[in-house]
């Protein structure tokens, strides 16, 4: 393990990400600022291998150091230009009674980070795609390596080589600069996302309730496993939920910088998994409803929808361009896309299958823990009493519905999708929204109020 | 301060109750702190190869051992004809999972083919399974020999 390389990357990710955040002029608390800086900076770093290769240079550690430093300097320009207006963000110290939860979270983090570091990559999707490309790119110093020459390795039919250039980029960088299995970048995302989400929940409810809700999420068995096993879905969840959260904020504030930020986050989620566009499009009615309610002019609506979608479209184009440039195998979608669009009934059949074969499946608890049961319990209580749904609770319910419908639509567009694999992991997108709903639910809010009152008394 | 201490105790109670719920109790025991992922044991096996064997088990070790002898064969391009898993199972070979060609290349750095590959006729090596559980590398000497192997292998489905 090269700790110097890891420190360099964390520093560069932070500075690059901080520069991007400055560009959007977001008002965030210190925890959110640090977490998003590291997460966005990672996306910047992931481009380094492609840039080095495009410059005709071999993929070696020295070239990575130069390229990442250059990219970071470029992203730090907004910081330099606005240095006089920079203020230290507010930091909220944890309270004594959060300590037991923080100890448990830290234990979970240690186990996850250790396994991410220690174990090599295992999923077939990775070994026949991203990891295979990255391993031989590092060995041979080029992304167009021997895996494409001579004997056919049957990679094209599996389609895994055509997935997320982000993962390929991160694997190459972390293999060259940190450790032979790469991978530890996932821990950076898992820790940052969990810390930020805890801070979000903690803002809404009493920290004891926030701790209990986070326990439900972090101990969801499959989600915990994918915090150290590299796959596309965990990362997609991170950026999808972030985009959803800021979309909720935008719908309240109407600030254009937040809309642009939402667009970028959806774009990055798209950079992880291309079907994100389905979910993003399903949020359009909520946006339109808001615009119509606010009596926004037709031209403004078109402009704002354009801003909302541009991130996703730009990243889709970028992913396609990177694949065309660095994967010398043609992509064939033959047999993968639904050729009979009239069969819309599939959407309903698959929606029923998702509920039956996953959410209410007897063994579903080994995937989700008691997360769904807790959510359904809280929802049932909310419906009976107090029957008051805040705007955020309503938005969370919409988010849950969008993920559910989006997954059913995925099965419609791509009939080869297996519910027990792709959809199971696709449901990760819903998990943090379930927790956000519980945090903003009327019943939990009242309980939280009681605790706060008792604490203050 | 008293309320804060009481809340700290409440946090502890919540955590204890949570991890004593039947499912989470089992999960912690069998998955979170499972025997196969014992950090103390893993700390004593830190080389790349040890970590690969820990994760991929016997199959990885067998394939690495077999391909370590490839250079002795003096074949211009050693290409292994991978047997289908069903064939290996019928030979009563235990604890050996045959990977697909891409994963074989990832493990060993050597190319391999399945019987349905367009490049199958470039295969120069095959695996031979002795009755005492030993596995050998066998050079494919003629197209007839290759065809005989293919005839045997084609009786089995290729599973991922």
Image (cartoon, rainbow, N blue to C red):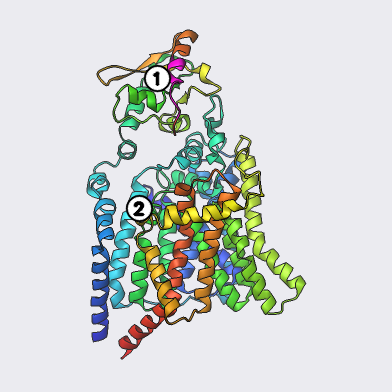
Front: mark 2 or 1: 2
Which residue corresponds to the image point at 66% horizontal and 55% vertical from the top-left?
Answer: A314
User: Which chain is mark 1 on?
Assistant: B
Q: Secondary structure at mark 1?
A: helix
Image coordinates for residue A346, horizontal then vertical, percent: 58, 51
The residue that mark 2 highlights is: A363
Q: Over which residues does the magenta segment extend? A: B149-158
Marks 2 and 1: same chain? no
Image coordinates for residue A176, horizontal then vertical, percent: 46, 43
Residue A433: which numbered mark, if any?
none
Which residue corresponds to the image point at 42% horizontal and 68% vertical from the top-left?
Answer: A435
Q: Which residue occupies the foreground of this view, B9 or B144?
A: B144
* Vertical order, B108 against A117 (above or below): above
* A4 drawn magenta: no
Image coordinates for residue B146, horizontal then vertical, percent: 46, 13
Q: Which residue occupies the foreground of this view, A383 or A393?
A: A383
The residue that mark 1 highlights is: B70
Q: Residue furthest bottom?
A: A457
Q: Residue furthest right?
A: A299
User: Which chain is mark 2 on?
Assistant: A
Which residue corresponds to the image point at 45% horizontal and 28% vertical from the top-left?
Answer: B158
Image coordinates for residue A23, horizontal then vertical, percent: 60, 67
- Can you see residue A8? no
Q: CA distance from mark 2 to mark 1?
A: 45 Å
- Can you see residue B56? yes
B134 on left or right of A187: left
Q: Secondary structure at mark 2?
A: helix
* B156 drawn magenta: yes
Q: Mark 1 packing: few (<14 Cα in 10 Å), some, or many (20+)?
A: some
Quadrant location of the C terminus of chain A?
bottom left
């Amino acid at each position: 393990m090269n700790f110097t390389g890891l420190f360099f990357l964390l520093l560069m990710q932070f500075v690059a990400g901080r520069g991007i955040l400055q560009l959007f002029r977001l008002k965030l608390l210190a925890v959110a600022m640090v977490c998003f800086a590291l997460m966005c900076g990672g996306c910047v770093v992931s481009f380094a291998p492609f840039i080095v290769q495009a410059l005709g240079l071999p993929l070696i550690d020295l070239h990575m150091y130069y390229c990442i430093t250059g990219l970071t300097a470029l992203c730090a320009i907004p910081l330099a230009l606005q240095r006089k207006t920079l203020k230290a963000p507010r930091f909220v110290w944890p309270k004594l009674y959060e300590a037991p939860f923080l100890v448990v979270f830290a234990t979970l983090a240690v186990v996850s980070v250790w396994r991410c570091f220690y174990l090599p990559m295992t999923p077939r999707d990775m070994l026949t795609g991203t990891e295979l490309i990255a391993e031989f790119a590092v060995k041979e110093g080029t992304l167009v390596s021997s895996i494409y020459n001579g004997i056919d390795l049957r990679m094209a039919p599996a389609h895994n080589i055509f997935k997320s250039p982000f993962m390929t980029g991160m694997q190459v960088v972390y293999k060259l600069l940190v450790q032979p299995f790469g991978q530890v970048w996932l821990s950076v995302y898992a820790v940052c996302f969990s810390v930020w989400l805890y801070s979000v929940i903690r803002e809404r409810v009493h920290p004891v309730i926030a701790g209990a809700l986070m326990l439900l999420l972090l101990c969801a068995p499959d989600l915990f496993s994918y915090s150290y096993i590299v796959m596309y879905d965990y990362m997609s969840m991170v950026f999808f939920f972030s985009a959803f959260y800021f979309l909720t904020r935008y719908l309240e504030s109407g600030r254009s910088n937040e809309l642009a930020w939402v667009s970028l986050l959806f774009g990055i989620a798209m950079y992880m998994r291309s079907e994100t566009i389905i979910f993003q499009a399903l949020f359009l009615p909520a946006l339109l409803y808001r615009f119509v309610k606010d009596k926004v002019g037709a031209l403004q609506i078109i402009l704002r929808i354009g801003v909302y979608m541009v991130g996703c479209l730009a990243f889709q184009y970028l992913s396609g361009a990177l694949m065309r440039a660095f994967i010398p195998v043609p992509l064939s979608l033959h047999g993968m896309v639904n050729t009979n669009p009239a069969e819309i009934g599939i959407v309903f059949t698959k929606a029923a299958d998702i509920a039956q074969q996953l959410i209410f499946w007897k063994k579903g608890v080994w995937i989700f823990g008691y997360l769904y049961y807790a959510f359904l319990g809280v929802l049932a209580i909310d419906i009976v009493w107090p029957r008051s749904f805040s705007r955020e609770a309503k938005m969370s319910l919409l988010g849950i519905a969008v993920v559910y419908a989006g997954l059913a639509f995925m099965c419609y567009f791509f009939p080869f999708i297996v519910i027990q694999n792709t959809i199971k992991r696709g449901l990760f997108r819903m998990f943090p929204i379930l927790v956000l709903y519980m945090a903003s639910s009327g019943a939990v809010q009242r309980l939280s109020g009681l605790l706060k009152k008792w604490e203050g008394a | 301060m008293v309320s804060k201490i009481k809340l700290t105790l409440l946090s502890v109670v919540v955590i204890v109750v949570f991890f004593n719920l039947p499912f989470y109790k089992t999960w912690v025991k069998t998955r979170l702190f499972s025997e196969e992922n014992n950090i103390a044991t893993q700390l004593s096996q830190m080389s790349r190869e040890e970590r690969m064997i820990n994760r991929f088990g016997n199959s990885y070790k067998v394939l690495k051992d077999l391909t370590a002898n490839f250079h002795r064969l003096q074949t211009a391009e050693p290409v292994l004809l991978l047997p289908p898993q069903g064939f290996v199972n019928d030979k009563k070979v235990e604890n050996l999972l045959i990977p697909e060609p891409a994963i074989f290349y990832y493990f060993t750095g050597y190319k391999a083919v399945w019987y349905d590959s367009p490049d199958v006729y470039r295969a120069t090596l095959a695996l031979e399974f002795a009755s005492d559980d030993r596995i050998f590398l066998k050079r494919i000497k003629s197209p007839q020999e290759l065809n005989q192997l293919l005839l045997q292998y084609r009786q089995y489905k290729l599973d991922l």
